[in-house]
Amino acid sequence: MSAVPEALEFRRILGDAASGCLSRRGAAKVLKLFPGDTPEKALTLEKETLQARELVGMGLTPPVSRAGSLEESIEALRRGAVILEPPRLRDIGAAIREFGEFLGAAGGPCPPEAPLQRLLAGLPVSAELAAHLYSITTEDGDVSPRATRRYGELLTRADRLRREMSSRVAHAASRLAAAGVLRDAPPSIRNGRFVLPVASGKRGAVAGIIHDRSDSGSTLFIEPAELVEDGNALQEAEVELQRERRRILRDATAMVRRELEALERGLEAATDIDAVFARALYSSRENTVFPGAGPMRLLGLRHPLIERDRVVRSDLVLPGEWRVLVISGPNAGGKSVLMKAAALASVMARAGLGACVEPGSAMPFFTRVMVSMGDNQSISDQLSTYSARLAEQREMLEKADASTLLVIDEPAAGTDPATGAALAAALLVFLASRNSKVLVSTHMGQLKKMALETPGFLNGSLAFDRETLTPAYSFVFGVPGASFTLEAARAAGIPGEVIERAEELAGDPFRLDNLLASLTELNEARAGEVEALRLQRSMEAEAEERRKREHRKVMTDFDAMGRALEEEYRSRMRRISSRADSLLAVISRAGGGPGEAREARKAIRELVEEAPPGPRPGPSPGGGPAAPARKAGLCPGEWVRIEGWNLPGRVESVGGSTARVRSGNILLSMPVASLTPVEAPEPAAPGVPRWDPIPVSPEVNLLGLTVEEAVGELDRRMDDASASGLFRLRVIHGKGALMAGVTGWLRRDRRVRSVSQASPAEGGAGASVVLLKEGT
């Protein structure tokens, strides 16, 4: 496992991540974190972090609140400790319970194949041991009076004797104080015995045992003889109590020792979980992403050690043939930062921290990252800056392979520009031949030119504002950058005549810098236009999505309204059908007079006016008019809607551009263009009378009639058509005065929607097509 180069400052990043640990051991593990050197190891670290992010979101914390105390207790047992004090035992019990609670909370969300299950498997420790340790200790760190029955009895006896002794001592002190024998001090305890502070001059007034003397010698601490036997009884009770206490602690410590290996596994697992949670917290806080596998595509790349409100993100997107990316541009323009950020993206992703990029990013898997950057001169090793660079480059030549990412900053710095550039070019060609991936920064025109001509070599630059002479820090792919050397010198106050002379001496390189600067400006302008177009398309897409949502809502409302109207239509038509049947019978009854027929037709017109129009085709999915139905290819048996006819019909035969359609009792010959396919009508409900249309011909022949006779006949036939649901009539009137009289009357009739000359196939100027208003 190769170390991460110090130049990347990866340890600073690990320090940031370790600050999320809750234990010292967890922080130490994070600080020792190495990136996975195989895709499998890196994927395991990634999955651990992502799963821990889910657990953090659930409010879980690592079970390490007692890790420090548990570690000290384990070390004491390893050193041979026989008795652990009650606070230690209670902390061990608390740690075991914490392990179990975490396991219960995290075990459900973690499926058996989840990476964290490996760590959770180390947590289980005897719950019985935890319960016992809690039962024999108290929260304030002492042995519980209920630890054993004997301990409780001994504790009660010792407390009783202590209270009795305290009472007797207080009584004796009052008596002797009244006699002026005692010093002005309360009774105390010396060597576990109750004593009185007796003035040394009154020694003879108190019989008893001297246990201590004051530093001045003026006070003797005497146990009165009358209390000696009671003191002995108390001492005996205390000894037995301490013996029982030690036995309880010794047995409990022996139980802990039997679970020592399980405790060590639990502590190690909890520490690992603490380290994984710290990685998850860092990933969540920095909003990192784990790039997928593929060609270099780092979107929104940023350096993790630069504050997010100051950093400029860049898209580092390189084609699959990339071997060497030559990055150029002015000093302090961000070249080194960009290369470090790309290298850290690989290192951090493989270490389970995630890369500081945006979703959708991808990059090749690198097992090793090598860096030649900064001033690594060493006086003790007799290395100059360039000698140190050569040592780093020699190591690259020896170790680099197809899975190596190399970061080289100014490969020819510190030596002759001409020979240094030649050596740098040879170095890059050799590394490219190894299929290594190289990011190199330079000011050298030779390397920029080489990137334009060599397969696998690419140019890139960092944007720069020529007017303000300030870097923009954003990466521009495919365009070499100018160094802006003379512009920077002019801004620094170098005299104009020096700058002008430098321009003369620079010659072609100066003109090349100007050309590169102009090319960069054009590229930035194009990028601005592309961004504006992207925003415009985004806004249009959002508007289209809003329109679709609105249309879906309208269609939903329209469907609901249509269903309600259709139900109302069916209900009303059932009522009207019943009344129409009797009226139709009157018209068709033999012997009915003209007046009776006219009254029946009038009643039918009123019924038609009362009847609502049938359901109509709804709007098209696009929100506009309904798309015309297919007209060609009508088949016998297919149901159609007939233009100018209120009821559907069924196709009986099709010949060329016309079709024979039966609607109720009427057989019509209609142009195919006037027919629209529809769904078959629902059969009438049982008990609902069927209302077939009156058998009325759609053709009215008025030839041979006067204008007055023709108008009367046409009036009657129009009533019949309306009553039967027929709204298209072909009126044959010829081309003379009869045509003028009939068409003039038709245009004035309120029942007529339109009058037009018939097509040549239907009679041309000698006939008219009349469309009646529906519901009249």
Image (cartoon, rainbow, N blue to C red):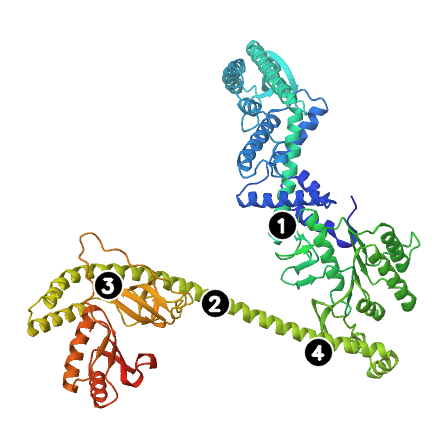
Asked which quadrant contains residue 607, the reply is bottom left
- The tag on residue 283 is 1
Most foreground residue, 179 or 336: 336
Q: Amino acid at mark 4?
A: Glu
Residue farthest bottom in this picture: 737
Q: Nearer the viewer, mark 2 or mark 4?
A: 2
Q: Is residue 499 above or below residue 53?
A: below
Disc 4 to disc 1, C-alpha distance:
39 Å
Disc 1 to disc 2, C-alpha distance:
36 Å
First-in-chain label (4 vs 1):
1
Q: Quadrant of the N terminus?
A: top right
In the rendered structure, the answer to whether residue 489 lies left or right of residue 56 reads right
- The residue singled out by tag 2 in the image is 544
Q: Residue at x 62, y 43 (%)?
A: 277
- The residue singled out by tag 4 in the image is 467
Is residue 722 at all visible to an observer of this figure? yes
- The tag on residue 664 is 3
Q: Amino acid at mark 3?
A: Gly
Q: Residue at x 34, y 65 (%)?
A: 653
Q: Residue at x 74, y 70 (%)?
A: 479
First-in-chain label (3 vs 1):
1
First-in-chain label (4 vs 3):
4
Residue neighbourhood size for the residue with mark 3, other residues' Cα within 10 Å, grouped as few (<14), some (14–19), many (≥20): some
Disc 4 to disc 3, C-alpha distance:
85 Å
Q: Is residue 383 above or below residue 696?
A: above
Callout 2 secondary element: helix
